[in-house]
Image (cartoon, rainbow, N blue to C red):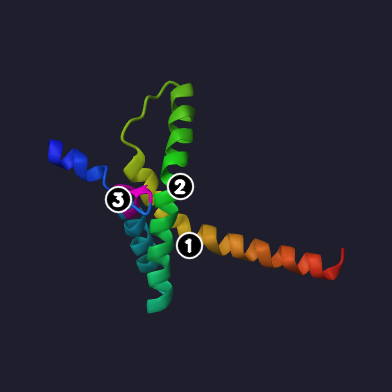
Amino acid sequence: MSEFHNSQEITAFGVKLVHLIAGVAGGVVRSLVVGRYGAITATSAVIVGGLTAGYGTPAVTSILCKWLSSIGYHATGLEGAVGFMLGLCGMTFAEAAILRMRMYKKWLSSGE
C-alpha cells in the first residue's frame, strides 16, 4: 500500500505523475472520439491534455473541493477525475485561446 501511495507522488516537470497520466488518457480519448485527427494532431492532443491536466489539476481540484464542501458534499480523491477531464478538454482550451488571440491581434491591427 505504501509503495502505491509513493508512486502517486512522483513528479515530472514539476507536476504529479498521476495528473500527467490522467491528462494523457483524456487526450487519447479526445483524439479517438474526434476521429478526424491525423497522427500529428492526435499526438498534440495527448501532449496538450497531459500538460493541461498536469498544471491545472491542483488549482481546479482545490476550487472544486471548496465549492463542493460549501454545498455539504465532502469530496475526496477527485484529482484523477479532474485530471482526466482537463486532459479531455485541454485541446479545446488551447484552440479557444489561440482563436481568441488571433481575434485580438486582428482587432489591434484594425485600429478600432
Q: Nearer the viewer, residue 13 or 18?
A: 13
Mark 3 and mark 2: Cα distance apart in space: 13 Å
Mark 2 Cα within 10 Å, few/some/many (few <14, many 20+)?
A: some
Q: Which residue is mark 3?
A: 17
In this picture, which residue range is highlighted in magenta? Answer: 14-20
Residue drawn at (37%, 24%) of the image = 74
Is residue 29 shown in magenta?
no
Amino acid on which the number 1 mark rests in the picture:
Met
The reply to whether callout 3 and callout 2 are in contact (CB within 8 Å) is no
Counting residues from the N terminus, which is met first, the one under dot 3 or under dot 1? 3
Q: Is residue 37 in view from this perspective?
A: no
Mark 3: give few (<14), some (14-19) or many (20+) Cα within 10 Å: some
Residue in the image at 41% along x and 51% along y? 53
Give the position of the C terminus as an image quadrant. Answer: bottom right
Q: Secondary structure at mark 1?
A: helix
Residue highlighted by disc 1? 91
Residue 109: name its quadrant: bottom right
* Residue beneath disc 2: 56
Q: Nearer the viewer, residue 99 or 31?
A: 99
Counting every numbered tag in the picture gives 3
Q: Amino acid at mark 2?
A: Gly
Q: Residue at x 35, y 44 (%)?
A: 81
Q: Residues within 10 Å of mark 1 (few under 14, many from 20)?
A: many
Residue 102 in view of the camera: yes
The tag earlier along the polypeptide, 2 or 1, is 2
Local secondary structure at mark 3: helix
Residue contact at pointers 3 and 1, CB within 8 angstroms:
no
Verify CB contact (< 8 Å) between mark 2 and mark 1: no
Figure check: 3 above or below 73: below
CA distance separating discs 3 and 1? 19 Å
